[in-house]
Image (cartoon, grey):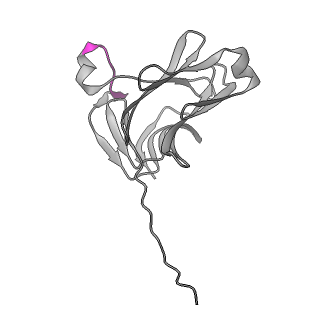
Amino acid sequence: MADNQDILIFHQSPTVEFATNYLRNVPVILQYHNQPLIEVVQQQPAGFTTQFTLFNKDGVYLAKVVGSRLFATNYGKKARISLEFPNLMTVCKLGNQVLFEVTRKEAAALKTEAELFTPDGRFLKARGAAKDWLLAKEPLKIGGMVMTANTISGCRIGVRVSKDGSVGIGCS
């Protein structure tokens, strides 16, 4: 009989800084209704990377960006969606407008800033770092509540925005 071993390999999902908050082991960073907009996906052999689903203001699906790869639809190509790679960053642009920036801080840490449209044309914006908050950078704002420097860990969805405008944090 062959000697079979059960091998357990643990891969740690990166910590993602999003709207001045930290999401650890959270696969969907931002979801609108039932559509994930920002995700952390496993990619072989690199480990984990970000995945963005991009729409224009009319709700037209433009592209999916997985790590540093752009998968544009015909609409995305016509709209001039593109990626740039300045120092340790991935920047996605629609013409001259920056849609999102991902900065690799270290092996298992990413900082994400985004200005995204939803499939029904609503605009979601998340920018800023806690230390720069007073310099017009923005933490996560929900109604009158301001969330900054929080850790959200071990849930399926970090921030879920519903069509009715309600927001859930740390959703299963």
Which residue reaches farthest right?
74
Residue under the image location 63 percent in, 27 percent down: 120
Which residue reaches farthest top?
96
Instruction: Specify the segment rendered in magenta.
Output: 135-141
Residue 158 or 111: which is nearer the viewer? 111
Percent x, y for residue 30? Answer: 48, 37
Q: Quadrant of residue 125?
A: top left
Percent x, y for residue 148? Answer: 28, 32
Q: How many marks are shown on the rendered structure?
A: 0
| Res 165 visible | yes
Residue 55 or 98: which is nearer the viewer? 98
Percent x, y for residue 157? Answer: 46, 46
Give the quarter of the figure containing the N terminus. Answer: bottom right
Residue under the image location 26 percent in, 19 percent down: 132
Residue 68 is one of the magenta-drawn residues: no
In the drawing, does residue 106 fall left or right of residue 119? left
Residue under the image location 46 percent in, 36 percent down: 166
| Res 124 visible | no
Residue 139 is one of the magenta-drawn residues: yes
Which residue reaches farthest bottom?
1
Q: Quadrant of residue 19?
A: top left
Residue under the image location 61 percent in, 23 percent down: 121
In the drawing, does residue 116 fall left or right of residue 139? right
Q: Is residue 152 above or below residue 95?
A: below
